[in-house]
Amino acid sequence: MISLQKIHQRLAEELEQSALSQAELGARIGVSQQTISHYIKGDKMPALDTFANLCAALDADPAYILGLTD
């Protein structure tokens, strides 16, 4: 089952593992550091295209981020 809390937690984990800063990740996908912060804290959900770009920039499996796989 998809959980918003799990999505935000896994995004945070992937960002930490990537060694990118929020500002660097934002620059790579064309959003601000503040927007990345909102995604990580769970204040906002990225749009589908932004989610795909986040996964690509973090080299993360979208199914894992969504909680569909472990």
Image (tube, rainbow, N blue to C red):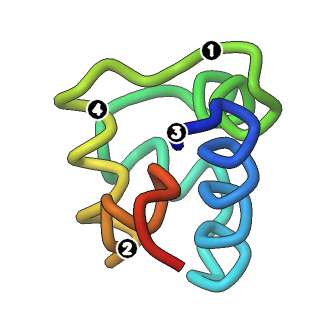
CA gap, disc 1 to disc 4? Answer: 12 Å
- Dot 3: element: loop
CA distance for labels 2 and 4: 13 Å
Going by the numbered disc 3, the residue's amino acid type is: Ile
Res. 44 image quadrant: top right
Check the image and report above or below for 31 versus 53: above
Pick whichever of labels 2 and 1 is earlier in the sequence.
1
Spatial distance from mark 2 to mark 1, Cα to Cα?
A: 19 Å
Q: Circles 3 and 1: CB distance less than 8 Å? A: no
Instruction: Locate residue 64, reporting x and y percent.
Output: 44, 68
* Residue type for callout 4: Thr
Q: Nearer the viewer, residue 19 or 63?
A: 63
Nearer the camera: disc 3 or disc 1 = 3
The span from disc 4 to disc 3 (Cα, nearest Å) is 18 Å
Task: Give the mark nearer the N terminus: 3 vs 1.
Answer: 3
Residue at x 28% of width, y 32% of height: 50
Indicate which label's residue lies in the foreground, 3 or 2: 3
- Which mark sits nearer the N-terminus, 1 or 4? 1
Q: Which residue is painted at 59% across and 23% down in the image? A: 35
Q: Residues within 10 Å of mark 4 (few under 14, many from 20)?
A: some
In the rendered image, which residue does mark 4 sit on?
A: 50
Which residue corresponds to mark 1?
Answer: 44
Between discs 4 and 3, the one toward the N terminus: 3
Please give left or right for residue 56 compared with residue 34 in the image: left
Left or right of 29, for residue 3: right
Q: Residues within 10 Å of mark 1 (few under 14, many from 20)?
A: some
Per the image, the residue denoted by label 2 is 60
**Residue matched to label 3:** 2
Residue 23, numbered circle = none
Q: Is residue 50 above or below residue 64?
A: above
